[in-house]
Each structure stands twice: as C-alpha cells, then as structure tokens.
Image (tube, rainbow, N blue to C red):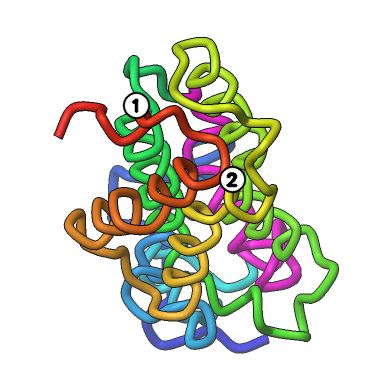
C-alpha cells in the first residue's frame, strides 16, 4: 500500500506509542471530521493530520465507520446527562432541550450516517441513534412526574406524543438542518406549542408560570 505524500513520522521528539498514539490518532480523526465531514473523510487525510501512515490507522480500525466511532467515543461525553431539576416544568423542559441540542451539536459532523444505508445496523449507526435519541422519553416522563408533584399537571392525561413533542421537534430539526435551533426558537416551541398542549390535556394552569 502506497503512502500519501503527506504521510510520515511525527516531528522529531514527538514519537508516540500506546495510549498516547491512539489518542493522537483519534484527535486527528475528530479534527478531520470537523473539517470535511463524514462522507469526505479519508484515511489519507487523517494520517496526514496525525503525521503518521495510513497503515497505522488501518491496523487499528480497518473500516472508516470503526475509526469514526472510536473518535466519537473518545471526544464526546458519556450518556445520559442528569435530568434537569429547576423547580418548574417550563424551565426543566428548556434545560432538557439545551442538553439535547448540545448532544446533537457534538455529533453534527457525522449525522449523515443516520441516513446512509451503507452503515445501517453498524455499531456507528447504533451509537449515533443512541446519542440522538438517548433516554429522553424517560427524561420527559420524569419531568412531568415532578411537575405533577408540584401540582402543575396530570401526566396521566397527557398523550404520549404531546409528552415527547419538544424532544422530537428539536431532534428532527437538527437531523434535517445539521444546525442547532436558536434559543428563541426553542423557547417559542416550549411557550407557544408544548405548554399550551400540556395545559389543554392535563394542566392546572401553573405549567406555563415558570420563570420567564
């Protein structure tokens, strides 16, 4: 296998082995993902950025999806984050949507994998689906249960589609546009769509009275 013209050993005094080498390779992969995206990512580009040979990469990760998955696991925090508890349903939901936006922003360089049949059923596809979905149905259920204890709403009367609507809309928009919605857009979603629906189905009138 021929080496790319940019391939080569690390600069003098920076020879890496073991965990240090692997971290450098995964950092280079992440930087290349940010620069060119998943579909344009090549072993040549990563090797050049990491000052190594393609053989070093192929030896550890024989498929691009494996290399990218390793880089994602290396650079993104574990799931799940703590479920927000701000003291009011409105601010809880806004905080949860902030977490989801941050999570999806982390994986934006490879979101196209979710629509690529060539990676369907792979560990990378499963990882991205988990990070884009997470346990947010459970998180919303916990937020609504807390709201019930505060007298804000009755979760038993709220349809499941209403309960998961904020998460579905934010995640769906980011998967389509590949960018985060503005804070104003998220706030409007909660104030103008979600909370009125909660009040209609099972609210006590207090759900929309969180801090504004």
Residue 132's x, y, as percent?
57, 56
Q: Is residue 57 magenta?
A: yes
The answer to which image quadrant residue 192 occupies is bottom left
Q: Is residue 109 visible?
A: no
State if disc 1 and disc 2 touch (CB < 8 Å): no
**Above or below — where is 100 with respect to 38?**
above
In the picture of the structure, the residue carrying the numbered disc 1 is: 206
Overall secondary structure of the magenta section = helix
Query: Residue 99: percent from the left, percent from the top?
Result: 40, 40
Number of residues whose C-alpha sits closer than 10 Å to that of mark 2, classed few (under 14), some (14–19) or many (20 or more) = some
Q: Secondary structure at mark 1?
A: loop
The spot of residue 170 in percent (x, y) is: 43, 61
Q: Is residue 131 magenta?
A: no
From the image, which quarter does the N terminus lie in? bottom right
Q: Residue at x 40, y 87 (%)?
A: 5
Judging depth in this view, the residue of 141 and 170 nearest the camera is 141
Q: Is residue 100 visible?
A: yes
Considering the image in quadrants, where does the C terminus appear? top left
Q: Is 124 situated above or below 134?
A: below
Classify 51 as above or below 14.
below
Q: Earlier in the sequence, mark 2 or mark 1?
A: 2
Identity of the residue drawn at 48% across and 36% down: 77
User: 210 left or right of 204?
Assistant: left
- Distance from disc 2 to disc 1, alpha carbons, whole Å, reads 17 Å
Comparing labels 2 and 1, the label whose residue is closer to the camera: 1
Give the magenta-colored segment's residue range. Answer: 56-83
Circle 2 is placed at which residue position? 163
């Amino acid at each position: 296998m021929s080496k790319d013209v940019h391939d080569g050993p690390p600069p003098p005094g920076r020879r890496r082995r073991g965990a240090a080498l692997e971290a450098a390779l995964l950092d280079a992969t992440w930087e290349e993902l940010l620069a060119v995206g998943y579909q344009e990512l090549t072993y040549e580009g990563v090797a050049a950025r990491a000052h190594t040979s393609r053989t070093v990469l192929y030896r550890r990760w024989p498929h691009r999806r494996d290399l990218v998955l390793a880089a994602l696991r290396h650079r993104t925090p574990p799931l799940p984050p703590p479920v927000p508890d701000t003291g009011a349903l409105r601010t809880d939901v806004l905080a949860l949507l902030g977490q989801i936006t941050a999570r999806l922003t982390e994986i934006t360089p490879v979101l196209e994998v979710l629509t690529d049949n060539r990676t369907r059923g792979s560990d990378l596809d499963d990882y991205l689906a988990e990070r884009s979905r997470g346990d947010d149905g459970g998180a919303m259920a916990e937020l609504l249960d807390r709201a019930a204890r505060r007298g804000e709403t009755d979760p038993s009367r709220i349809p499941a589609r209403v309960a998961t609507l904020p998460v579905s809309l934010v995640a769906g928009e980011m998967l389509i546009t590949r960018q985060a919605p503005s804070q104003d857009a998220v706030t409007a979603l909660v104030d103008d769509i979600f909370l009125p629906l909660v009040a209609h189905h099972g609210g006590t009138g207090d759900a929309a009275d969180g801090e504004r």
